Image (spheres, grey):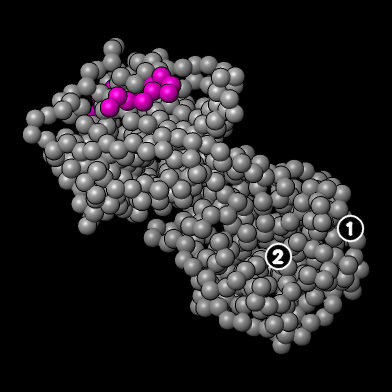
């Protein structure tokens, strides 16, 4: 079967199975024996199918090919390799040879073409070509297409001799690759779903500004490393057009991957945008990606100082409360306790310093958000527009009403700040100040969707998240509690498809870092307003975050219907504590 070429494809120089190859080739090398049919080597089967029932990419149809090695037995699920743009690299022959020599595991290959939406009349109109949309776009859509739609469909098929097609669902047994836009697509799928793919082959990857992939070198440096092994390839004569410089951006990716602690090998050459070099080095690429298998691919250690200062080796996220219907906003309180409301169940829970959760009262069953106060009470926003304060016995006292709040914070002097997103955002979005005695006033308006709110460690700055944008606003707190010097201060990363951060609750540590719960994870900012690192959670978007634990050194977060905790090497602080002045930031 001839390789499918929907676009020209570039691949470059030959790399050894270990180490980093820095050779440059004046001309494309020729494929070696491992890319050619060898006598006596068992030959696998290539089957062709079509798929046109996608709900993620509705209306599309596409062809795909499945390679099944001769050594495959349904009794033992095979490893998996997924390739975009159909069959490339003489992959079936390479797989035959490497599997026979035990230089890669028994692997089923799925070679899939991008989708097309058929024109009503092919004589007068073109199909819609989905290649750039599916391949160059960021986000998890394509990964979901593979995991939820195409791969389950593949496992319904059988070989010509009746063997059921079964492959491993363990990410360590799965690789994904491609060329040009297909390469960045492979990277994005693994980046979004490292629980599904752990090995990535990128030839002349389109890490440029076609649909936002030029952000990857930056994100790599900020994210906690994922369990991925990567092989990059490009050439100095690659494209340099309106969207960017392929050669330059691939080198940026390699430098970022190295900085971030990933296991990465690259192969640079002097070629242009063609597939010849990739075909020549593909056997070595496979040897590298599958080396030491089944030993798991490990996450490396980043050189990001923010991450190294914060994280403790061996301390990952642990689910401490997962059997709840809708765990809501977290509140850190005295003695290291953390509160959260399960509004669907109508209960409020306390997580003690021992990490165990217990129900404390049904009195806050309509809680939308909560915060501990300096008086030891738990302040709660109720669904009916009231701010209530609960004492240790569960008795409530009204603090204010007529505020349909999103979040609140109680300062050490007793002032309460409440954000109100409003039913439609915009002009209805407000920031309230409630002084002791219940006197309330609006101290700011104009945010599109005011959500999370917290105070700086010295309590001279109020921070308010605007979930409908990428901004967290900073205000200077005046002596009377009012606000001045409003500024779009903290710049957050946003998902490509949503264009908003969905920023929720926030907290700060004693050094002045701001922790923001967002749809990308917990974004950690320095005092100068910059995202320095991002902590993803296993279940995706984060809706709430706070510090707790006996020494305030445990970060708690809600995500995917569960509450997680992670011990850090730094300590948090709370608004109910006495103000403390952190050191000045590095500018």
Give the residue displayed 67% in from the left and 59% down from the top: 505
| Element on which disc 1 rests | strand
- Say whether residue 246 is left or right of residue 233: right
Quadrant of image for the N terminus: top left
Quadrant of image for the C terminus: top right
The mark nearer the N terminus, 1 or 2, is: 1
Q: Residue 442: give its label.
A: 1
Residue 4 image point, x, y percent: 36, 25
- Magenta segment boundaries in residue numbering: 1-19
Residue 389 image point, x, y percent: 78, 77
Q: Residue 173: give its label.
A: none
Numbered marks: total: 2
| Element on which disc 2 rests | loop
Give the residue displayed 53% in from the left and 16% down from the top: 241
Q: Residue 575: give its label.
A: 2
Residue 30 occupies which quadrant of the picture?
A: top left
Q: Is residue 512 magenta?
A: no
Residue 334 drawn above or below residue 247? below
């Amino acid at each position: 079967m001839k390789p499918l070429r929907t676009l020209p494809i570039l691949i470059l120089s030959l790399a050894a199975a270990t180490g980093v190859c820095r050779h440059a080739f004046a001309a494309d090398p020729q494929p070696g024996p491992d890319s050619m049919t060898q006598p006596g080597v068992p030959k696998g089967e290539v089957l062709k199918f079509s798929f046109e029932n996608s709900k993620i990419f509705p209306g599309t149809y596409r062809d795909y090919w499945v390679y099944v090695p001769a050594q495959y037995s349904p009794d033992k699920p095979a490893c998996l390799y997924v390739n975009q743009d159909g069959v490339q690299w003489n992959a079936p022959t390479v797989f035959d040879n490497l599997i026979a020599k035990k230089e890669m595991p028994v692997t089923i290959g799925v070679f899939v073409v991008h989708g097309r939406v058929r024109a009503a009349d092919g004589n007068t109109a073109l199909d819609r070509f989905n290649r750039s949309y599916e391949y160059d776009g960021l986000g998890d859509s394509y990964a979901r297409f593979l995991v939820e739609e195409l791969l389950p469909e593949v496992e319904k098929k059988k070989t010509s001799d009746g063997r059921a097609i079964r492959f491993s669902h363990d990410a360590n047994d799965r690789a994904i690759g491609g060329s040009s836009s297909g390469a960045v697509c492979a990277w994005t799928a693994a980046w979004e779903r490292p629980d599904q793919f752990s090995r990535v082959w990128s030839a002349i990857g389109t890490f440029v500004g076609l649909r936002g992939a030029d952000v990857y070198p930056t994100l790599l440096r900020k994210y906690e490393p994922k369990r991925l092994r990567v092989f990059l390839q490009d050439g100095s004569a690659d494209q340099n057009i309106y969207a960017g410089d392929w050669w330059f951006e691939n080198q940026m990716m390699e430098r970022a991957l190295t900085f971030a602690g990933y296991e990465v090998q690259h192969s640079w050459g002097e070629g242009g945008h063609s597939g010849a070099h990739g075909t020549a080095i593909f056997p070595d690429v496979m040897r590298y990606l599958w080396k030491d298998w089944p030993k798991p691919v490990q996450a490396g250690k980043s050189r990001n100082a923010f991450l190294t200062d914060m994280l403790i080796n061996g301390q990952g996220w642990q689910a401490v409360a997962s059997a709840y219907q809708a765990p809501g906003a977290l509140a850190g309180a005295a003695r290291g306790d953390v509160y959260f409301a399960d509004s669907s169940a109508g209960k409020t829970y306390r997580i003690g310093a021992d990490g165990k959760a217990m129900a404390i009262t049904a009195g806050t069953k309509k809680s939308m958000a909560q915060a501990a106060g300096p008086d030891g009470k738990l302040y709660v926003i109720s669904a009916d527009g009231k701010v209530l304060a609960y004492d240790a016995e569960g008795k409530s006292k009204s603090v204010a009403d007529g505020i349909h709040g999103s979040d609140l914070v109680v300062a050490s002097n007793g002032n309460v700040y409440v954000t109100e997103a409003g039913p439609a955002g915009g002009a209805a979005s407000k920031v309230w100040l409630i002084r002791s005695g219940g006197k309330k006033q609006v101290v700011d308006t104009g945010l599109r969707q005011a959500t999370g709110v917290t105070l700086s460690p010295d309590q001279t700055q109020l921070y308010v998240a605007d979930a409908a944008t990428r901004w967290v606003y900073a205000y200077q707190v005046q002596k009377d509690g009012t606000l001045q010097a409003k500024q779009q201060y903290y710049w957050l990363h946003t998902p490509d498809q949503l264009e908003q951060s969905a920023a929720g609750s926030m907290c700060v540590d004693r050094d002045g870092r701001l922790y923001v719960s967002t749809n990308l994870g917990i974004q950690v900012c320095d005092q100068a307003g910059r995202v320095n690192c991002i902590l993803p959670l296993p279940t995706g978007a984060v809706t709430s975050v706070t510090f707790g634990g006996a020494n305030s050194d445990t970060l708690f977060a809600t995500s995917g219907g569960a509450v997680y905790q992670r011990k850090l090497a730094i300590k948090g602080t709370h608004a109910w504590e006495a103000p403390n002045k952190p050191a000045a930031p590095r500018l």
